Amino acid sequence: MSSDIYSPQDLAGRVSKLTSILDVAKAMAAARDLDLLLPLIIYEAAKVVDADRCTLFILDRERGELWSKVAQGASHEIRVKLGKGIAGSVAETGQVINITEAYADARFNRDIDAATGYRTHTILCVPMRDAQGEVTGVLQALNKHLDVFTDEDAELLLALGGQAAGAIENALLHDEINRLFEGFVSASVVAIESRDPTTAGHSGRVAALTVGLAGALEHQGTGPYARVRFGLQDVQEMRYASLLHDFGKVGVREHVLVKAEKLYPQELDALRARFALARKDRQLRSVERRLEASREGKLHAALDRDETERLATDLRELDETLEFVLACNRPTILPSGGFERLADLGRKHFRDEREAEHPLLLAREVERLSIPRGSLSSEERLEIESHVSHTFRFLSQIPWTRALKRVPEIAYAHHERLNGTGYPRKIPADTIPVQSKMMAISDVYDALTAADRPYKKAVPHPAALDILHQEAKSGMLDGELLRIFVEAEVPRRALRPPGV
């Protein structure tokens, strides 16, 4: 159709509509959220063809039907079988349908009007085609204002539909990628927690707390974080980093990862067996002394009584020593003098039935029982700490999208501390991402308050906050972020049960 058949006014109107289509095409190309994109498309479609309302149907080939996630004037999703009705016919044939009187066309479904109370008069329905020419959906305009739909309206709606098809395909692909990442992250969290079931839920709670703290920053009008704001993609990046912050634990030997006491179970079994042999040694020595006294004719009631008391004392001391050793084996702080007593026990011996001498405690047992805090030796603690480097190396292998590219970096720094005492790199405070500083607070809080574990008891909320404040005062955690964490009641809000 050449331009010379248009009046200057008509031509200006057509140029304006084409310009509008180009503008909305740019907006659609940038849209990634289907819930935001679809209303934009039908709003612009109605405006371009001067329709009262529009509906967009997406083709579901697997189910052989069209579905409308959004339709102007409809409060619920509409589904149409392929080939049925006007929209179904357009989707099946790929041909435009332009109806000047809906109720005179047998293909029109009057039930929808009856259900909505709307009166349809004119209908323009066009296919939406992708870059390969395949029909991917249908655009349907209803009730042209003061007129009927024209061929030009169909042409414009087809142009807009082509742009919309590409935008919807991109949005659906983006949604698929998001679901893929969500599935990957969920599976990774399951893999982490299967290594150590006692920490189940930790990654999810740390993510909830960190995201909750990010939300609390939105309300800060003063202070160093007054201008810090996180968009939806920033929050998603932070959430993924929090969920995966401990993934590197898959690279830590399992017996070290789940070590509940200072000695491993098999070592403790060997130690108990040694104390059992020491008891027999004490009993055997008592019998030998009685026999010796009997041979010398010195055994009498008083000596027998003294020997019985001596044996009872020896066995009682041995049992008390074992209780002390078992207490040292638990991941608690040793009492005053505990280290010296352990060293002294390491110098004590007993004899077996072949008169061979054995130490009551082995040197490596003394060393491990002397661990001042927790259950891990320095070598084991380094192995546990290596999980951060394992996490970073693993996450760096993933081809993250541009919006998520900092996930490895954020997770890498969650054990760094502002005063340089963290690990693994001991980096300066100003190089630690703020997301990592937030995650550090969340991680410590959850580690303290989580349900009882074999190696620690749960710390009540107030006591946990006291410990966090102490770490902030010592320069380990960010004091301002901690203040916001506490005042915004992030734990209560982020971890409350659904519906509460």
Image (cartoon, helix red, strand yellow):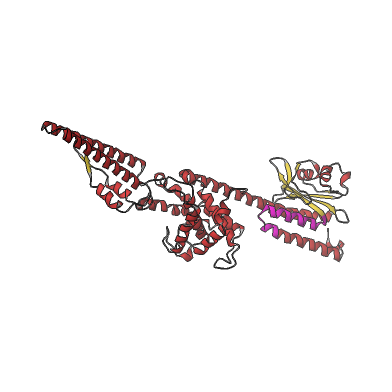
Count the labels in the image. Answer: 0
Residue 485 placed where, x, y %? Answer: 54, 59
Magenta highlight: main SS: helix
Q: State the residue lying farthest toward the left.
A: 296
Name which residue lies at 77% across and 55% down: 45
Q: Nearer the viewer, residue 35 or 356?
A: 356
Quadrant placement of the N terminus: bottom right
**Residue 59, position as x, y percentages in the image:** 72, 45
Q: Nearer the viewer, residue 364 or 102?
A: 364
364 is within the stretch colored magenta: no
* Residue 474 vertical placement versus 62 (above, below): below
Q: Is residue 314 left or right of residue 454?
A: left
Depicted 4 relative to depicted 348: above or below? below
Residue 209 visible here: yes
Taking 34 as reference, is 225 above or below it? below
Q: Which residue occupies the extreme front position in the image? A: 302
Where does residue 243 sit, x and y in percent of width and height? Answer: 53, 51
Residue 230 picture quarter: bottom right
> Residue 267: image x %, image y %?
33, 42
Side of 252 where 366 appears, left or right: left
Asked whether the viewer can see residue 413, the reply is no
Q: Nearer the viewer, residue 269 or 320?
A: 320
Q: Magenta segment range?
A: 26-51
Q: Is residue 372 left or right of residue 250?
A: left
Q: Quadrant of residue 91?
A: top right
Q: Quadrant of residue 490?
A: bottom right
